Image (cartoon, rainbow, N blue to C red):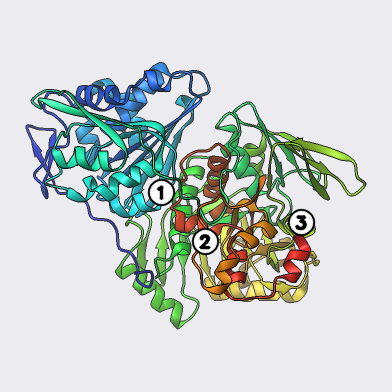
Amino acid sequence: SEDECVPLPELPQLIWQDGDFPSDGQSGDVFYAREGGLAETQAVFLAGCGLPQGWQERSRFAIGELGFGSGLNALACWRMWRQTRQAGAVLHYVSIESRPWSREDAARAHGAFPEIADLSAQLLARWPHRAFGPQRRWFDEDGFCLTLLIGPCEDVLAGMTGPFDAWLLDGFAPAKNPGMWSIAAMQHLARLSAPGARAATYSVASPVREALRAAGFEASKHPGFGRKRQRLEAQLTAPPQPIHSLFPRRAKPIHSAGTVLVVGAGIAGASVTRALTRRGVAVTMLEAAPSPAHGASGNPLALLTPRLDRSDDAGARFYRAAYLAALDAYAGQPWFRAIGALQRPRNSEDALTLQQLLAAPPLPAPMLQAHADGLWHPMAGVLDPTALIHAWTAPARLQCAAQMARLEQKDAFWQAYDAENRYLAQAEVVVLCAGPSLAALPQTAWLPMVWSGGQIEYSAHSGGVELGHAVTGAGYAAPWNQALIVGATFERQNTPHLAPPNAAARRANLDAFTALTGKAGELDMRSLISRTGIRASAPDYLPIAGLMPDAPAWLAQQAGLAHGRPPEMSRAAPALTGLYVLGGLSARGFLAAPILGELIAGDICGEPALLDESVLDALHPGRFLLRALKRGEHLATLLGCVG
């Protein structure tokens, strides 16, 4: 239920035989053949999907797997990819697992295969956490991207988007795990598959063959491996009729030789740039300020803590995934320190929420613990925004002091101009990460933005105040060596106008600091510097991320929604082709931006989406058009903005 906290996923019940040979205590089935798990993967799954020949001459390839287990298949595939890939190519390996293994059990299983010891060590060092949702691990040196989707197989498949080029159907035997082999599951595979996609499994059971054939795959038996007499290969020969998404996505995947224009060099633009450049896509950036990391991203320090909810709606699922992604993106970097954060309740209702989160924790103990004064987040930390953003924007061609005022589409390109009508740049794909400037562009002016000013207090020399960790609640305080940041106020405004610092906001920040720490009297007031910024938010306080719809055309296509009719899904949703937006991050930019950068870059490159479709819809800019239609709101003003 969306109204209930989601507990941690179950752990598998492993039974270890002959040392390091695991079987499943629930089903009684084995995870891989005694004759050699790596050899089985090679013979049954990789060769069965026509690999490595299938990915030759391909710059991007995507494999889906049902059942991650110890990750042995992923390691075998990674090893083959490393040995055979062409320079600059990227392999996406996306696996579903309902009962994730612990790092210790995976290490025990991997120990039987010394030939993959180096890859195992890399994976184990960044082993996914025990939490529902997506977790992604990039291994940039090899162009290998592992995404683990933790949850019930049928539910996860229903929310996924493609396209996938190959499938490893690595579940237990059909009699022991029928849900993974159902016709509905195979139909999802067909929906998610690229034309001619291949699938392989060790099972040749009649229900498996029938389910595959019912979904449009042609299945055939082949000589098996080890004690298994036969194995199965399948290829999608009768793809299903496409069902388009309600909102536009990946209308025109870019080639690796293309260039993307990113407007805005704050944390949003930096995250998109990082995600694109690791895929080999060239990026040009426009930044209105004299250098990156200005505006709302320009504070001297920033705090990373999770946003956890007692519900399991799309927003809660997004922010849980965002925290896991941000921790992976920042871990081990010189501009991040995991000092931990104490989350104090702001009021009695908040205290109840924290108790409910502890009763059904959405994150494992290394990430979320009880504390006498609230919740303790051991892996939360503090960032140096300037160092982070400079590092992530370094690969781009950066043009600073370049204030884009107008964007026009000519032929296949978007062209950017300044207020004096001087040409700045052009590209087939543009990502708008300009925060408050979104309100000034005709293409995005209809987005219902909410503006708020915020003030922080910063001291490079905290004057003797010693905080060993961050504290949050009604405000926050976070240390970095001798430095300290305290904040932040929220002041609603009607326009994205930056107001100067003021004494009332400083008093509010210091009062909050006293309530959180009891240490305000120790602050050296002479060392405090006030700084203000503008936050851009959506009315629902979720980020705005996705391909921009062609608003008048979309409203016309979906006009029936205003009269209670179902959405029109037989045609592609109208889009402003090649124009993306990433904004509305509010006060959670450093939490949300890394995963949203991956989301946008993956969409641009035509990859399987990292987030499930319900979350994608909850973040998409088209959601505001949908709400206006369903509520019967007057659209003349909105259409005037875009028409």
How far separated are the C-alphas under marks 3 and 1? 33 Å
Foreground pick, 131 / 533: 131
Secondary structure under tag 2 reads helix
The Cα–Cα distance between marks 2 and 3, rounded to whole angstroms, is: 22 Å
Image x and y of residue 8, in percent: 29, 59
Can you identify the residue that label 3 sits on? 437
Q: Is residue 120 visible?
A: no
Q: Nearer the viewer, mark 3 or mark 1?
A: 1
Pointer 2 or 3: first along the chain: 3
Sequence-first disc among 3 and 1: 1
Amino acid type, residue under disc 1 in the picture? Met
Q: Which residue is mark 1?
A: 160
Residue 192 at x, y percent in the picture: 40, 42
| In front of the other: 273 or 642 | 642
Mark number, residue 618: 2
Give the residue drawn at x 27%, y 25%: 48
Q: Residue 35 sits in which quadrant? A: top left
x and y, in percent, of residue 173 in the image: 14, 41
- Mark 3 residue element: helix
